[in-house]
Image (cartoon, rainbow, N blue to C red):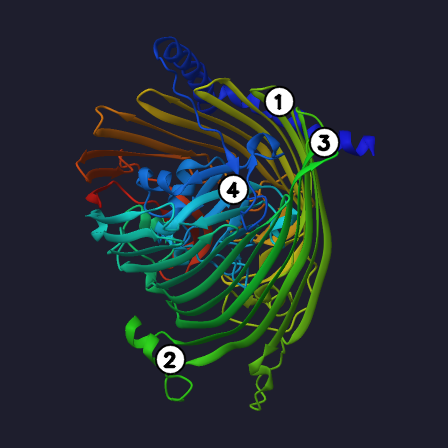
Amino acid sequence: MCPRLVSNLSFVGSLWRRSVAALHGWVPRTLWWSLVFVCLFARESQAQTSPAVTLPEVTVRGATPLMSVPLPEKNIPANVQVITGDEYTASGALNLTDFLARDLAGVSLTHVQNNPFQPDVMYRGFTSSFLLGTPPGLSVFVDGARVNEPLADQVNWDLIPQDAIERIELIPGSNPVYGRNTLGGAIVMETKRGLTNPGTVAEVWGGSFGRVRTLLQTGGRQGPIDYFISGNWFTEDGFRDFSTGNVGQVFGKVGYLSDPHDLTFSLTYVNNRLTGNGPLPESRLAHDRSAVFTHPDRFSPEFLSLNGQYRLDLGSGFSLAANAYGRLLDLDQFNRDVEEDVLARTKQDGWGSSVQLTYQNSVFGVPLTAIAGLDYTGATLRHRIAERELGDADDEEGEEQFRAQEEDEESGFEPEADITSETHGGGAFLTITMEPTEQLTVTAAGRFDTTALKIQDRLASDDDGERTTDASGSHRFERFNPAIGATYSLLPNLNLYANYSESYRAPTAIELTCANPEAPCPIPTAIVDDPPLDPVKGKTWETGVRWSPLPQLHATLAFFRTDLEDDILFRNAPQSRVLGFFQNVKSTRREGLEFLLKGVWGRGQWFLNYTLTDATFQDEIELFTFANEDRIALVQKGDTIPLVATHRVNGGVEFSLTPAWKVRFDGIYVGSQYLRGDDANERHRLDPYFVANIQTTYRFHNAEFFIRLENMFDGEYETYGAFFDNTLDETGVERFLGPGAPLGAFGGVRVTF
């Protein structure tokens, strides 16, 4: 046991030496001098300001997805990050994912489709994406409801009611309490209610790229009843050609609060029409950054969800929390590619429920928090794909033809895939946190998880004699995952922690139906019969220190390592730009460190974060690639996983020029990344980039006027890259890049009543 422990903890020393060596680079050096400056500034501020401004204490509520048990940060053996809805509003961010990347350490966005509401969200080298085929590694919850979709554990970020979010907590590591798919972490959100958000807010703003946004929300309380309603509408022309889109969201919640009962019901309705026309060949990008390669790629979801939550104080330290929810999604996609029109339609019904019993009291004089819970999720879906030769019909006509396809055999579309799937998953968990001494807190947790999938290939039952494969089948995956951690306060303002945790991810329906090297399939345009895949197992070690040298200053340093066994990757088939298959690989690793600083002074607040992430393959693999002439990538142990930046810095400062006039500045630096497909690290990487934004607000009575500049220095940068054969321009294999948005100017007003 001891040699294994020493081996696993040795990564801390390795990462520390690596980070010290990196101080020769300008980014870490800037971070170092920033720390020296803010410490001196905070010290001077403390000497001149009376009474002293202090940072608020952080309370973590996401010990479980239901967010019903508050715990002080010093008792949590992980670098949990907490942000609020008020901070989101003040940030001026376009949407939730933009806010996460601006304010949280370790979070970055990859815009594969170049739609601002459909990015890949990456944290510690793990991804949450709406794209089928992207390996998922983060779990996302809203009011205790898992929002990872059943087809591929993807997350449709545009379906989350962004203006209704009260609180967001980012839980790092392979914490088993959050169930399957929590390999790199969990993002847990809680929505607003009228009890804590009384009054009415109206907002309108607009500016570059044809963007216009309106918001209206109101909340209040009448006796034991409270209510909250929010609606927003966003439309844009886009910063690239043929990229119009709109987002419409409505959220409502009604609650009943009368001791000891707390009951809420919420409804979310979303109807969006998004366009993301994807990356552009570098040869075209050099001449026109607003151009597109092929168009349109339209994504049109209609979504409805209902969620009921109940909390009951049972007395004597016991409390009960439960929820039940349903999710209905109708999704149409239309994609005009180089040689064909591709249409996909998904109709899914999802539901789930969870219940947990909490005990918070002292046992033999030792403070104890114990939570035992059960949860269940289920879903049925039908996923259909059809294609036709490239036609003259525009996207509107093409979508209408697809809807009529079942009744009109002359529509010109040929079915490529038609599956139904049924998913059932759930688990039982127990987590216990105890404080044997005033300085020491110990946490232990465990969860047994089970996932069952049943897939039916509807085309395999056709009598036309043309279908030679059958993707139908039943699959079940089960695993017990443990976690243990501890915190120790050396001083009231100095806290150490360490933890070990395990979790797993079951192969998704889209992976299970595309895992045969002999029958590669395009994602997501075909389904074939396949051999089974093994579940991915994640094991995370994390250790760190939290320190508040001054009441105005807080610092966190965290070291982490996550090893994945039987990781699932999508491998391209030889000589194909789109064909491929999913397959297990022996192991991959993500390790690194996070350094967080935040502070306040009499006229404002600031934060600064640095993240080092080293994501690598841990065995030798032979993959197909367009990155070299041989089309074979000989991946060696230690090669970097593409699209994971080693260095990332983000920070911001907000200060008051007058009591009514505020200015906020924030910026993000992302280091270089290998392009997708360059798994052997043979080609030139994406250039590093820095994006800065500035916002000024002025309050006059109950109105707040604001002006924002996004990418204020108008830098040219790319967040995504891959190697493909440019058959349209006949230029051969070249880099396809996803350009970032240029300088944008926006202004508006927000009125409160």
Please tell me which of labels 2 and 1 falls first in the chain: 1
Q: Quadrant of residue 196?
A: top left
Q: Which residue is mark 3?
A: 365
Does the rendering let one see residue 565? no
Q: Is residue 287 above or below residue 456?
A: above
Three-letter code for the amino acid on which mark 1 is drawn: Arg
Which secondary structure, mark 3? loop
Q: Dots 3 and 1: beta carbons under 8 Å?
A: no
x and y, in percent, of residue 473 in the image: 67, 74
Compute the Cα span from label 2 to label 1.
59 Å
Please tell me which of labels 4 and 1 falls first in the chain: 1
Compute the Cα span from label 3 to label 4.
32 Å
Which secondary structure, mark 4? strand
Please tell me which of labels 4 and 2 falls first in the chain: 4
x and y, in percent, of residue 297 in the image: 36, 63
Q: Please state which of the two labelled residues, at mark 4 or mark 2, is closer to the viewer.
A: 4
Please tell me which of labels 3 and 4 falls first in the chain: 4
Residue 170 tag number: 4
Q: Which residue is mark 2?
A: 403
Compute the Cα span from label 2 to label 3.
66 Å
Identify the residue at image location x=58%, y=57%. Answer: 570
Q: Which residue is mark 1?
A: 17
